[in-house]
Amino acid sequence: MIARLFLIACLLVTACGGYDHTAAPSLETILSDTPAQTLSEYGLFTDRAAETPANRVLAYDLVNPLFSDHAVKHRFVFVPGGEQAIYSDTDVFSFPVGTVLVKTFSFAPDMRTPETDRYKVETRLLIHKEDGWAAFPYIWNASGTEATYAPAGKQRNIDMIDPSGTPLGIRYAIPNKNQCKTCHQSGDSVLPIGPKARNLNHDGPTGFSQLSNWQARGIIDGVPAHPPVVPPVWESSLPVESRARAYLDINCAHCHKADGSASNSGLWLGWTETEPVKLGLGKHPTAAGRGSGGRSMVVEPGQPDQSILVFRMASDEAGIAMPELGRSVIDEDGLLLVREWIESLDGRE
């Protein structure tokens, strides 16, 4: 009788498209040369709605998430059993082959309460294959029951009330595979952006110290007693300069670095950069096209309205707006923060 009940349960799981809650993701599917056509095929979640992570799939978040048209993001990491990432104080951790980084983008009708009637729009996978990292975008169906591989990306109209209470309609862009590579470029390679010690060093969604939790679970080893950290961008009691630098680090530095897609600009906005000119202070642009807005300096200390950085952040026009990808509306809060920082630089060279 017990064996019969077990067989019936297995058949029901298969028929309903469910998963064994003790099963780990499929390494065969993860490392295949051909991307799965549906997200559920990877076995990263125990349900097709991708709400419950499978065994060894861990939810995580960042101290400061990148702005993406007010989208809510849910992140997960899978590291194969018996493998560990290599810790770094400054760079993205070196994850083993078979690692999957998952990021799902969601919206709600009223983004002041983003978990109420939340619906998923896209999930991006970054998979460490045998020959390096590769990006795979998946688009969710209207019922939120499955996401399908979409290498060409897609545009989607989204209506919402934004976090400030203002009705907003946007043309949300789901990137294609090549656009994913643009943001994740590091020299000739594709690399993750977020999983750095300074971004993970806080209490994550599990309520535990995130780096300690990763080490305890065997995802990473060698975490020091005092890993680096960046300040929470919206903690107004902290210095404006450090908060603005943290904002630029997560929103801009993945392109604006020595081996990034915007390296020819000479503007490097990473948290560890110390040279004022590379941060834009008193720096003339490498090209004076329409993107400069007639301004002569990237950051003119004390003069946000005369700074190219502010001009481009305040634009939603293609060819001028920065970042170029990942947003269709202006991040008003981020813009205000950067303006305040530049104003505070009055008199600095």
Image (cartoon, rainbow, N blue to C red):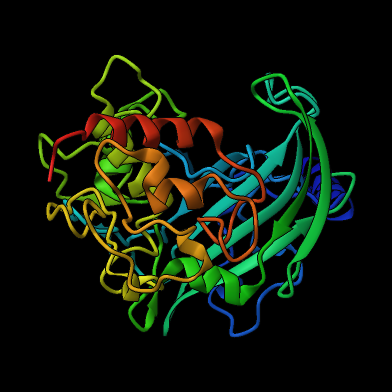
Q: Would you place residue 165 above or below residue 302 in this image?
A: above
The residue lying at 58 percent from left, 60 percent from top is 325
Quarter assignment of residue 193: bottom left
| Number of marks in picture | 0
Where residue 286 appears, as percent x and y from the top left, is 33, 73
The residue lying at 58 percent from left, 47 percent from top is 54
Q: Would you place residue 225 above or below residue 101 in this image?
A: above
Q: In this view, does 124 lie to the left or right of 97?
A: right
Q: Can residue 316 be seen?
A: yes
The residue lying at 29 percent from left, 74 percent from top is 259
Q: In this view, does 300 lie to the left or right of 234?
A: left
Where residue 129 appears, as percent x and y from the top left, is 46, 77
Task: State the residue lying farthest toward the top.
Answer: 237
Where residue 108 appears, as percent x and y from the top left, is 76, 31
Instruction: Specify the quadrant that holds the N terminus.
Output: top right
Quarter assignment of residue 109: top right
Residue toward you, 207 or 170? 170
Q: Is residue 267 left or right of residue 52?
A: left
Residue toward you, 142 or 232? 232
The residue lying at 46 percent from left, 35 percent from top is 334
Residue toward you, 37 or 157? 157
Where residue 266 appears, as percent x and y from the top left, is 27, 69
Q: Can residue 147 be seen?
A: no
